[in-house]
């Protein structure tokens, strides 16, 4: 079976999710993927053990040009990475969500509408 998807979009989103996790993780990053056959949805989740999102960040993190003001590297980033990821997910029929883990740390989940074909390639 072949999963039909735009791999360049998916890799762009995953790269940004990992870049953010690397920036904030204390020492642990987990990456998970899954395919929900009923919904035709491919899921990517990146979780880190960093400080997680504040309430303000949970509300604004996906908006364009939002930067955490107190972050020491705030001037090095434009604050558009997660917004671009959300737009890429939308173009692929999916979503992007941010949350905090019960154990602490951030959890970012991207979904992409995909279908499985028995043969052929993308």
Image (cartoon, helix red, strand yellow):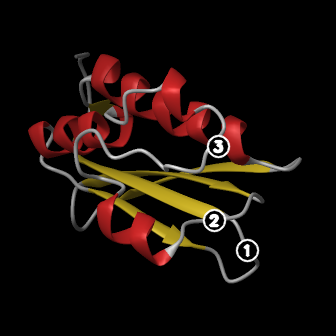
Q: Measuring 61% from the left and 62% from the top, which residue is drawn there?
A: 106
Local SS, label 1: loop
Q: Nearer the viewer, residue 76 or 41?
A: 76
Q: Measuring 14% from the left and 45% from the top, which residue is drawn there?
A: 90
Local SS, label 3: helix
Tell which circle, 1 or 3, labels the residue nearer the N-terminal end. Answer: 3
Q: Quadrant of the N terminus?
A: top left
> Residue 122: in sight, yes or no?
yes
Tell which circle, 1 or 2, labels the residue nearer the N-terminal end. Answer: 2
Residue 122 falls left or right of residue 106? left
Q: Nearer the viewer, residue 62 or 73?
A: 73
Bin the neighbour count of mark 1 within 10 Å (Cα to Cα): few under 14, some 14-19, many 20 and up. some
Contact between labelled residues 3 and 1, with CB atoms less than 8 Å apart: no
Q: Is residue 108 above or below residue 89?
A: below
Bin the neighbour count of mark 2 within 10 Å (Cα to Cα): few under 14, some 14-19, many 20 and up. many
Q: Which residue is mark 3?
A: 21
Contact between labelled residues 2 and 1, with CB atoms less than 8 Å apart: yes
Q: What is the residue that sits farthest to the bottom in this orientation?
A: 102
Q: Nearer the viewer, residue 61 or 109?
A: 61
Q: Nearer the viewer, residue 5 or 80?
A: 80
Residue 93's x, y, as percent? 12, 48
Where residue 71 sits, quadrant-wise, is top right
Q: Measuring 32% from the left and 70% from the top, which residue is drawn there?
A: 59
Find the distance from the CA under tag 1 to the CA under tag 2: 6 Å
* Circle on res. 104: 1
Q: Is residue 16 above or below residue 30?
A: above
Where residue 97 sits, quadrant-wise, is bottom left
Residue 119's x, y, as percent? 26, 25
Q: Measuring 41% from the left and 71% from the top, which residue is drawn there?
A: 56
* Circle on res. 52: 2
């Amino acid at each position: 079976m072949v999963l039909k998807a735009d791999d360049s979009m998916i890799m762009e989103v995953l790269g940004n999710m990992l870049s953010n996790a690397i920036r904030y993780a204390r020492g642990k990053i987990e990456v998970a993927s899954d395919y929900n056959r009923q919904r035709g949805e491919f899921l990517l989740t990146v979780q880190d053990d960093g400080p997680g999102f504040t309430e303000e960040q949970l509300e604004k993190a996906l908006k364009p040009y939002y930067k955490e003001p107190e972050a020491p590297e705030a001037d090095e980033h434009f604050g558009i990475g997660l917004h671009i990821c959300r737009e890429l997910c939308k173009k692929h029929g999916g979503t992007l969500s941010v949350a905090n883990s019960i154990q602490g740390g951030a959890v970012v989940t991207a979904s992409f509408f995909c279908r499985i074909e028995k043969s052929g390639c993308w």
